[in-house]
Amino acid sequence: MANATNTFRPEIRFLFGDEERTLRDIDPQMTVLDYIRLTERKSGTKEGCAEGDCGACTVVLGEPDGNGGMAYRTVNACIQFVPTLDGKQLLTVEHLKSKDGSLHPVQQAMVETHGSQCGFCTPGFVMSLYQLWLDGGEDDRGAINDALAGNLCRCTGYGPIIDAARKAGGVAAGDAVEQKRRADVAARLSSMIKDAGTLAIEHAAGRYYAPRTSDELASLLVAHPDATVLAGGTDVGLWVTKMLKRLDPITYIGDVADMKSVYETDDALIIGAGVTYSRAHDALGRVAADIGELVRRIGSRQIRNAGTVGGNIANGSPIGDTPPALIALGAKIVLRMGDVRREVALEDFFITYGKQDRVAGEFVESVIVPKPKSGLVFKAYKISKRFDQDITAVLGAFAIKVVDGKVAEFRAAFGGMAGTPMRAKKCEAALIGQAWDEASLNAAQLALSKDFAPMTDMRASKEYRMLVAQNLLTKLFIETNAPEVATRLVGKEAAHV
Ligand SMILES: Cc1cc2nc3c(=O)[nH]c(=O)nc-3n(C[C@H](O)[C@H](O)[C@H](O)COP(=O)(O)OP(=O)(O)OC[C@H]3O[C@@H](n4cnc5c(N)ncnc54)[C@H](O)[C@@H]3O)c2cc1C
Ligand code: FES
Ligand code: FES
């Protein structure tokens, strides 16, 4: 094994509710959902889609928050692998009822508001509501919708479930009993894995390593350059459940402590590759409001609680949401192999469809997002068929600086328009140095049709993609230009939408 100075541990240790579990000799690709249903024989948690879309498999995961308490989050059990439970607490719908048999407030609220009919989706909704309750509850309709967007119901209609969210309320901030419970769980978990070394499973079905430091990760990947890097598993999980792939070995980066932080310098935000969308959201929103909103619309709460910005980049997808926005902002990534690091402009990382500037054994360590300089306006627009839980058809991201009516700086990047996320360089050239007026807008739209030859697929036709991309420029024009100019161009009402 790669790092001879470390100790390795072959068994997974976690809490299932309040009960300790130590698992040896387990296929590292077994999903948490299969474990719950087939090994624990708890059938409350359901399988609907096995791809993170429906929320029927929603469970709550807790882990020590580093301040003596616990941080809880919902995830889709269907696309998480069992070894990722190491050092955590797994809570399913079976854990909510009190010892005396009384229902938890969120369960009681679901009963009283008639929030369940056939019941198939109900355990998943209950777990999302339970997370909302753990977070203190919510009354605002938008916030409740956001918390429930990853749970689908075919029969009840969402009204009664939203009523249940309001009725259940939440745990009071500073509740002494709850705080003590969390502190006790955190202490138990910490003692279970303290000094226990790195999880390393070598099973006949495959190997799995969960390094705890980036140095250890780097050594492991040098020793196993063919390893599949696993971050949030919101792509990789589907390779197993939908494509039935065998991955061997897997190197999990979710426990690498020094890649799980976001920190700021005067000029930039640095996001570790193990940081989930949910944790990156606020900081990205402070850099530019539109990128915060973009991240808020990625998948669902469960997906954002697991998926990472690093994974969104490393997967090389032409329709990942963060790359075009990060390219427009001029972001860089830090790639590392062994002890050697190199910084690459994000736009240069994507070479062609399915090919990135990354060699075997190298990994994305962090993402450097520059803060927009004074006067630079950033806008990003995601176009998809549904608002939540949908993959992008076209995404346009723009960073523009207008000085004395002229475009002084302009970077435009698109997703869904080519085999990779890509800058629209002809479009940029058509605008830079020009007055920010209708004539330049038209010229930029024409240039855009020379930048890209999009394809037709199940999400959109090539004609639709091009028209939408050009219209996004119009939207940018309206939102960044004087109202009277915008009104003349698109009509009085549209200009004020
Ligand atoms: C239901 C659902 C909805 C989704 N909605 C959206 C959406 O709205 N917008 C969107 O953009 N995406 C969406 N996705 C896709 C997915 O969530 C994102 O691409 C996510 O960012 C992947 O990150 P991850 O941490 O889960 O990566 P993983 O699945 O763990 O890994 C993805 C790929 O990146 C590699 N990798 C991960 N981290 C590193 C690293 N540090 N170094 C090197 N390689 C690495 C892995 O080996 C793998 O090839 C959705 C997925 C699902 C299942
Ligand atoms: S079974 Fe549908 S999200 Fe997991
Ligand atoms: S109650 Fe039937 S799917 Fe929701």
Image (cartoon, grey):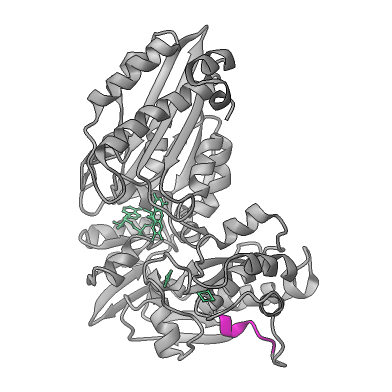
Q: Quadrant of the C terminus?
A: top right
Which of these two is toward me, 23 or 378? 378
Q: Is residue 476 above or below residue 316?
A: above
Q: Would you say residue 418 is visible in this rendering?
A: yes
Report if residue 95 lies within the magenta region. Answer: yes
**Residue 34: x %, y % from top left:** 39, 82
Seen in the image, is 196 located left or right of residue 448? right
Q: In this view, does 241 lie above or below 20?
A: above
Report if residue 91 lies within the magenta region. Answer: no
Seen in the image, is 404 located left or right of residue 422? right
Which of these two is toward me, 438 or 353? 438
| Residue at figure coordinates x 35%, y 44% from the top left | 393
Q: Quadrant of the N terminus?
A: bottom left
Q: Where, by quadrant of the figure, is residue 72 drawn?
A: bottom right
Q: Is residue 393 above or below residue 27?
A: above
How many numbered badges does the structure rendering display? 0
Which of these two is toward me, 90 or 94? 94
Which of these two is toward me, 158 or 84? 158
| Residue at figure coordinates x 50%, y 60% from the top left | 305
**Residue 214: x %, y % from top left:** 39, 55
**Residue 240: x %, y % from top left:** 28, 70
| Residue at figure coordinates x 48%, y 56% from the top left | 304
Residue range of the region highlighted in magenta in the rendering = 93-98
| Residue at figure coordinates x 57%, y 21% from the top left | 492
Q: Would you say residue 331 is visible in this rendering?
A: no
**Residue 10: x %, y % from top left:** 36, 80
